[in-house]
Amino acid sequence: MPVTSRSFWSQALASCLLSLLVLTLLPAGQAWAGVDSEISSLLNKQNLGQAEYSIYLVDLTTGDDLVKIHPDLPLMPASNMKVVTTAAALNLLGPDFVFRTELRMIQPAEWINLLPEDQKQFQAHLPTLLVHGSGDPSFGDEKILGEHGKNVEWLLDLWVQAVVRTGVKQFGSLMIDDATFDQEWIHPNWPTDQLDRWYCAEVTGLNFHENCLNVFLQPTQMGMAPSVDFAPSLPIITVTNRALTGRSDTFSVGRVTGNNEIVVRGEIKNRRTEPVQVTIHDPPLFFGRVLADRLRQAGIGVQDVIRAPLDRTLPAGATLHALQTTMPLILDRCNQDSHNLYAESLLKRMGQKLTGSPGSWNNGAAAVRSFLTSRLGASAAVVHVDDGSGMSRENRVTARVLVELLADLYGDPQLGPIYLHSMAVAGNSGTLEKRLNPGADMPALVVAKSGYIRAVTALTGYMLVPTDPAVIPTSSTTPDFNGYRVIAFSMLFNNYKPPVHHYMIKDLEDQVLRLVARRLFPQIQNQAQQSQPHLGG
């Protein structure tokens, strides 16, 4: 029977719709055949030796698995542990949670019984200043202050002026209440030879200035000691300057464990504009001494700086000033800049909320485990939480768990967008500023968390592929789940050894995402073309 014009075009339309259906329903089958083998080929070319890896990519738009290579192998996540910590904090503390740091004044009758007996007779007639911390990691953070045109001295002056307005010229004590967290400031599984580095800063109930001191070094005359300055400045800082002005920049700046003695060694040649960050010991009392010094400069005396008793209820007093930090800001700094202090503060704060006791690594880990079980069920049983930042080599997680967690947040209309925006944007911000720049070679936007410690490299996040084939995102594109085909991915690599290096694994991660994006983008183009078939005329 001859085919009529009408039946021909009906068959053509049906064929086009069938093609669209096949492309839509079978991305993990026919359309994705060979992707695992292509990625395995990439892995083999790196000669990874005895390295272990867990890789999992899922199309959240369709629910299809795209790539699965050892997805259930528990591995060290490095800073991808922050993916878990921040998700738990967003859920357990809530998107409206705020950290609050307060400066209060307490009259003598309210606090005298808190003092040791030998101090009561000297301070019975004097009020006290009380600083109450809630574990805010951003208190005095120069980067956040700088984004608002301020600095740490502005913050200190804000509090000094609040005290000046009371009209009181002499205080008995400046009391520091840091009991929101426990007194274990250093995690036992952190590298002991790196405890003076910023990423191993002590974690306390009152954090200040990232719990670090900025050390500025400048050369002087050849063979002479370089100049050493600090911010925030404090007269009582001890410096052992064993460095010389020389012909090379081979210096080191460290801190003696257990105190705040700064040691400078080696040679310095060039003038430096950027400081060296060194952790400080006992940040709560350090902050108290800095504030007392600024009060002294303003003509206000403080007889002593002390830690509030941990076993007594403190009087409320009158609030002179309070600083609050919102959850989205904390998440952004934690995930985009991979800031360990922020992750650990979130972990301990969750533990404090769960138990009502001072936040610790133990009760914080329990809070995170509880969150994972409630959201992911039995698959979370393989996760071992040792700290919040991933510095500990005892953490374990799988690529599947991380992707399931991303999928869970993707399906949460309240928390999902906040979480997405907290991560670094490839080619634009944070630790991904110089990676995976979107364009013709990478027709997708990667929003993710990177991770690295010795012999561990990881990358976990979302890849957003535009559903409009005419749109190729740029590094300035604002991440959004709407208008994109959303791929959740996680890649964890452990125990690689030379000649394989960290930068080679990072390049491999980028190659995997480019391969998947380029494979997926033509499908979207084909689907768009097939969805509106040309019927002639």
Image (cartoon, helix red, strand yellow):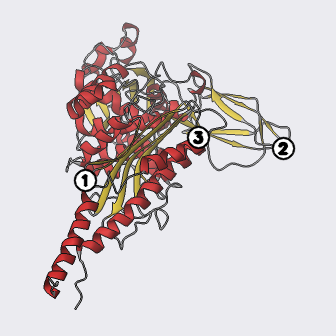
Where 357 sits versus 508, above or below? above
Q: Quadrant of residue 253?
A: top right
The picture places residue 426, in percent across and down from the top left corner, at: 46, 55
* 10 Å crowding of disc 1: few (<14), some (14-19), many (20+): some
Q: Which residue corresponds to mark 1? A: 62
Q: Which residue is mark 2?
A: 247
Instruction: Report whether 111 appears left or right of 195.
Output: left
Residue under label 3: 502
| Earlier-in-chain disc, 3 versus 2 | 2
Rendered-image quadrant of the C terminus: bottom left
When asked about the image quadrant of residue 284, the answer is top left
| 259 up-or-down from 12: above or below | above
Q: Amino acid at mark 3?
A: His
Amino acid bearing label 2: Arg
The reply, left or right, for residue 508 in relation to residue 133 is right
**Residue at x 44% of width, y 33% of height:** 77
Q: Quarter of the image for the N terminus: give it.
A: bottom left
The residue shown at (24%, 56%) is 25
